[in-house]
Every structure is written in structure tokens, then in C-alpha cells.
Image (cartoon, rainbow, N blue to C red):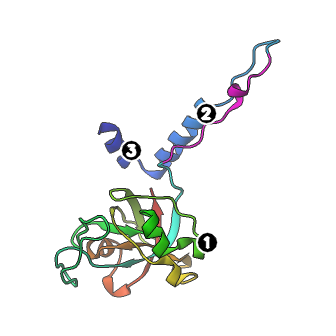
Amino acid sequence: MRARQERRELGFPELAMRLALFHLRKRPKPARSGEPRRERDTEMASPPAEVMAPATSEASWFCCGPAFGPCSSAGGGACGNCKSASLHCAWPNTSDACYDITRPDKCGDDLLRRTCGHQFFVKHLCGTTEIAVTVRDCGPQTDLWCGEKRCCSGKCATNRLIDFTPAAFTRLGSLSAGIIPVTIRS
């Protein structure tokens, strides 16, 4: 549990440094004089599976769970425990069934599978606040908005790859905006 908590507290620069150090440890070992190189000495390790490069996306909001703010009572989402009053999100690749509905690939987005409980760090493209959100639902239906674009101060994002609960969305922008451009990292 301690390792998981430590990983959550790392910012992007620290994560990049750890990834670089990880690869340095796996550099090819020099062959001794007169000794042929063995294949296993030149293998490179792949990056850890949990690393996702930062991505830009549009983000909208949705209601789930007990009534809260603008939301009436709704279902608990694909994970069963989504709450509009919590910092939760919906991701379009939580399962095969989810992916079959949302189809981000139709918009050219090749998304990693992130299941219930996964945590993303998101920031409005024109803001300074970064928040952590937890996957609690499947969505948005990305293929309905391929090519849709939102900009602020010349910074733009296309395609809806993430939805936030009202509690999460209001940490980044006004609910009345409906859609905002964000950066997502894992």
C-alpha cells in the first residue's frame, strides 16, 4: 500500500525521471574483452504498464449516484459506486463491453484500458489547478463527437475522452461551460 501511495504523490517531472532511471538500469551490458555479446545483454525493458503519456481531451460532466447539485438521483455507473458529489470520472475503455459502446478508435484515439478505481490527474488547459479523479463509470461515447474541438487562450483539445461528475468538473471550470479542454495523465 505504501508504494501505491508514493506513486500517487509523484508529479509528472518525478515520474519522467523515474522512468528514465528505469531504462538506464536496463541498458546493454558491455561484453568483456573477447567475449561475444549475448542477446539477453542487449534487451531493453519496456516501460511500466501503468505509465500513460499526458493527453489532451475535451471533458464534459454527467450525473451518477445520489442526488447532488444539479443532478437528480441516478444509477451508480458501470462500477456501481459512482457519486456526483465525489471526484469521479467516466473513461471510455474500462472494459470490452464499454469500449464496444464508446468506440474512441473511430476518432483515432488508441486508449489504454483503465478499470474501475484507476486514478487520473487532470487539469484545465488554461488553468493551474490539477485534481485527481477516480474511474467509476464507462463513457463518454467518444465516437459521437469525433473532431469536436474546444480551445482557450490558443490551447485546443479534440474528442471527448473523459467525463467528470459535477463535483470534479466544478474544481476545473463552471458547469455552465458544459465542455472544457483538459490535460489527462495517469
Per the model, the C-alpha gap separating discs 1 and 3 is 30 Å
Kind of residue sitting beneath label 1: Gly
- Which residue is nearer to you in this view: 121 or 97? 97
Q: Of the two numbered discs 2 and 1 on the same chain, state the one appearing first in sequence.
A: 2
Look at mark 2 in the image and give the residue it sits on: 24
Number of labels in the image equals 3
- The residue depicted at 51 percent of the width and 55 percent of the height is 52
Q: Amino acid at mark 3?
A: Arg
Q: Quadrant of residue 114?
A: bottom left
Find out whether residue 155 is within the magenta segment: no
What's the residue at 29%, 39% (across, down)? 1
Q: Can the viewer see residue 150 in this picture?
A: no
Residue 75 appears anywhere in the view: yes
Instruction: Read off the magenta span.
Output: 36-49
The circle on residue 7 is 3
Of circles 1 and 3, which is in front?
1
